[in-house]
Image (cartoon, rainbow, N blue to C red):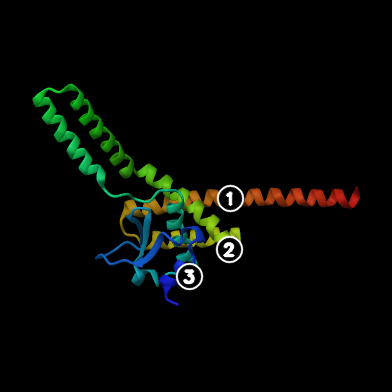
Amino acid sequence: MSELQRLKGLLPPELQSWVFVEAAASVEPPLITIEEIGRDEVEIQVDLESWDGLAIDHRNLLFWHEVGRVQNDAVPRDGWEMAALAIGLGGAIGELWVQDGLLLVMALGLSGFAGYRLYLKNNSEKRLQDAIAADERAIDLATRFGYTLPNAYKSLGGALKELVEQTRKKKKRAFYEDRLEALRKSAGKARAEMAQQQGSRQSVTSENVYG
């Protein structure tokens, strides 16, 4: 079974009809990325040459991170914002010339909305929060596919550490480091909750014995 077929088998059944897994075809592609390829169709693209150098558990969790982005509706959309911004600004200039107030307001509104969407798309804090949310989804998916919770955290943490070590660009490396720090906090919280649950079960057992 090829790696692409193996990854397709890691898709939740509810996504298998509209999420596709393909080898990246661009020059110097990212390790793994995702994009919308049509209406209600998404493609996860993998740079197989770099991908094969990772441990399987690391691959799995990085793949489920991308699946998590699909589940969170955080897939990059077509870049319509730049076109809308240009149309809106061009329309605003034109309406200034003909002095049509209603159309001027509409053109400025289109420009403002497109500009806001561009800001959100390129906002580093939102990108980080989206990535952290997808990491949480990846952990949930890993447990759904048979990982224990500690092993799921360990595998994703190991994958992020490897990405940190392999990344030369300072900004991108800091992005992975921030995700790793958020993952550590999440793992600590999960560990505390598990310990509390175990303590509660032991307490109930004691009551049953001595009751």
Q: Which residue is mark 3?
A: 56
Instruction: Give the side of residue 201 with respect to residue 174, left or right.
Output: right
**x then y, percent, for residue 211:** 91, 47
Instruction: Give the side of residue 182 with respect to residue 89, left or right.
Output: right
**x then y, percent, for residue 185:** 53, 48
Element carrying mark 1: helix
Disc on res. 113: none
The Cα atoms of the two marked residues, 1 and 3, are separated by 24 Å
Element carrying mark 2: loop
Q: Residue drawn at (43%, 53%), measured in percent from left and top?
A: 70
* Image vertical order of residue 75 relative to residue 120, above or below: below
Instruction: Give the side of residue 58 with respect to residue 103, left or right.
Output: right
Amino acid found under the numbered disc labelled 2 = Tyr
Earlier residue among tags 2 and 1: 2
User: Badge 1: how crowded within 10 Å, few (<14), some, or many (20+)?
Assistant: few
Amino acid found under the numbered disc labelled 3 = Ile
Amino acid found under the numbered disc labelled 1 = Gly
Counting the numbered discs, the total is 3
Q: Quadrant of the N terminus?
A: bottom left
Q: Residue drawn at (36%, 67%), measured in percent from left and top?
A: 22
Q: Residue drawn at (74%, 50%), measured in percent from left and top?
A: 199
Check the image and name the residue furthest to the bottom.
1
Earlier residue among tags 1 and 3: 3
Q: Which residue is mark 1?
A: 188
**x then y, percent, for residue 47:** 34, 67
* Image vertical order of residue 119 relative to residue 93, above or below: below
Q: Which residue is mark 2?
A: 147
Nearer to us of marks 2 and 1 is 2
**148 vs 97, nearest the viewer:** 97
